[in-house]
Each structure stands twice: as C-alpha cells, then as structure tokens.
Image (spheres, rainbow, N blue to C red):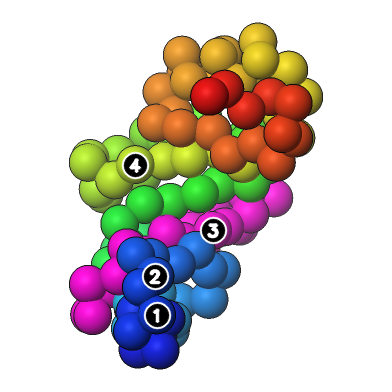
Amino acid sequence: MNYLKHCGARGIISTHLDPLRHAHTIDLYAIQRTFLLDSGAKNTIINQLKNTPVDALEVLPAPVAPKLLDSVRAISPDIPVVGGGLIWTLKEAEDLLSQGLDAVSISNPQMWIS
C-alpha cells in the first residue's frame, strides 16, 4: 500500500480486508469489493462493514446489490454503494441507480458514457 501511494495511487479496490485497513490508515481511498451470493454472505458483509473502515462498497453482481442497501445504510448511512457485474444494458444501469445504488461499475466500453 505504501508503494502504491508513493507511485501516486489514490485508492484501491480489494476483496481482502487487511489491505483495505492499511490503505485507510494511509489515506488511500479504500473500496471493499464483495460478492452477495446468499444470506450467509450478506451477514458476512455486514459484519465486515462494522469492523473494517472502508470508503465505499462494491457489490457483485449488480442486480442483487439493492438487496443489501437497507442493511448497509443502517450501519453506514453515507457509504457509497456501487453495483458491479452482469449489467448488460443502459436501462439495467438506470434501474439499479433508481433503486438507490450510488454508482454502477461496467466493464463494457460500449456502455461507457463520456
């Protein structure tokens, strides 16, 4: 993390909590990437948010991310929640944003809006 900061990185995205904790202590923006696969995963995500300071949460796959919003907002009302993965159309992205996500992450360059 120190090397990344020295090279000019402004933040990291990781599924691993230790790098996120360290990044947060040295003022790198820390985004926790997590997978919402079932109710057990939901409980794990909520416990992690209670115990690990992060600046944002990215939930994959995006179509299920809204199911986590109420629980996340109850713990951290101001944390940005990003939905990532399995977004195929602009309408799907717009629907996810209208359901309360702060942003979506899309890897298809044809959907990027400049």
Residue lying at 30% horizontally and 39% vertically, measured from the top left? 73
Assign a secondary structure to mark 4: loop
Point out the tag, 2 or 4, that comes first from the N-terminus: 2
- Say what secondary structure mark 1 lies in: loop
Mark 3 or mark 2: whose residue is earlier in sequence:
2
Q: CA distance from mark 3 to mark 2?
A: 17 Å
| Amino acid found under the numbered disc labelled 1 | Cys
Disc 4 target residue? 80
Q: Which mark is residue 112?
A: none
Categorize mark 4 by other alpha carbons within 10 Å: few (<14), some (14-19), many (20+).
some
Which of the 4 image quadrants contains residue 6?
A: bottom left
Q: Amino acid at mark 3?
A: Arg
Location of mark 1 (residue)? 7
Query: From what the image shows, is residue 99 above or below residue 22?
Result: above
Residue pointed to by mark 3: 33
Is 23 inside the magenta-drawn segment?
no
Q: Would you name the residue on which mark 2 appears?
A: 9
Residue 5 in view here: yes
In space, the residues marked 2 and 4 are separated at their CA atoms by 20 Å
The crowd level at tag 2 (other Cα within 10 Å; few <14, some 14-19, many 20+) is few
